[in-house]
Amino acid sequence: MADVILETKRLTKEFKGFTAVNNVDLSVQRGHIHALIGPNGAGKTTCFNLLTKFLVPSSGQILFNGRDITRTRPAQVARMGIIRSFQISAVFPHLTVLQNVRIGLQRQLGTSFHFWRSERSLQQLDARAMALLGEVDLDNFADSVTADLPYGRKRALEIATTLAMEPELMLLDEPTQGMGHEDVGRVTALIKKVAQGRTILMVEHNMNVVAGICDRISVLQRGAVLAEGSYAEVSGNPQVIEAYMGTPDGAHA
């Protein structure tokens, strides 16, 4: 029996008569990199918003480590170890790279977001912060102001601050969106590296990224699961090809 960390049962979200997520059964295995893919408007981000409790499901269940978290509040879900990294880079631009990671680590001190604490009380976190920056290849940028970082490095910093929250399950929303080829390669390698001993669920458009690092893929179309399996299984599925490429005669679905 596979060790399932996150499971949804008939997860559904309706907006005024429009069904954005439709009876989705998802099963994420511990230690896997699992991707949610699908054409634009397939319901991927809505699904993510349900899992992180930014939206309340219309019906269905969400289970984390076998526990029903369907009605659990977002902050409680984060404390349980489900941490989300956003589509738009969510870092403090005028703080240094080290200070950004330290804010994520402050949770362990019980002083989260107490920006007025003396600098000295936070120095005990520096060694751990530097270790996290080393994990994402940013240790040489520790004293740089975040606003000055290239886009790909900002996303790496965001992953470091997510790691600082000690996630059991990391949710990555379009981690390579808007990146050039070099940055995509760097961030893809980084995700693979930080996935060691962790579980990652990601929404991703770039099929090369998905093919390169994902253990399992769920394909959404019009809010429902169209197919699931390895990249080889999913990419060869005629329904998936049609959903992405249009009908065989060239007309788009």
Image: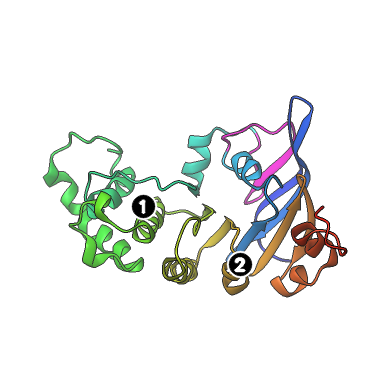
Q: Identify residue type, mark 2.
A: Val
Q: Quadrant of the N terminus?
A: bottom right
Residue placed farthest to the front in the image? Answer: 250
Q: Residue at x 56, y 68 (%)?
A: 209
**Residue 210's mark?**
2
Can you tell which mark lies on residue 250? none
Q: CA distance from mark 2 to mark 1?
A: 23 Å
Numbered disc in front, either 2 or 1: 2
Earlier-in-chain disc, 2 versus 1: 1
Q: Residue 55, position in %: x, y?
A: 61, 33
Residue 67 appears in the rendering? no
The boundaries of the magenta stretch are 53-70
Q: Of 176 and 178, which appears nearest the observer?
A: 178
Q: Secondary structure at mark 1?
A: helix
Residue at (53%, 41%) from the top-left corner? 77
Relative horizontal placement of residue 75, taking residue 114 as reference (left or right): right
Q: Position of residue 183 (x, y in %)?
A: 42, 66
Query: Where is mark 1, residue-wise?
Result: 161
Residue most extreme to the right: 249
Residue type at the position of mark 1: Thr
Please determine whether, in this image, residue 215 is positioned above or below residue 58.
below
Q: Secondary structure at mark 2?
A: helix
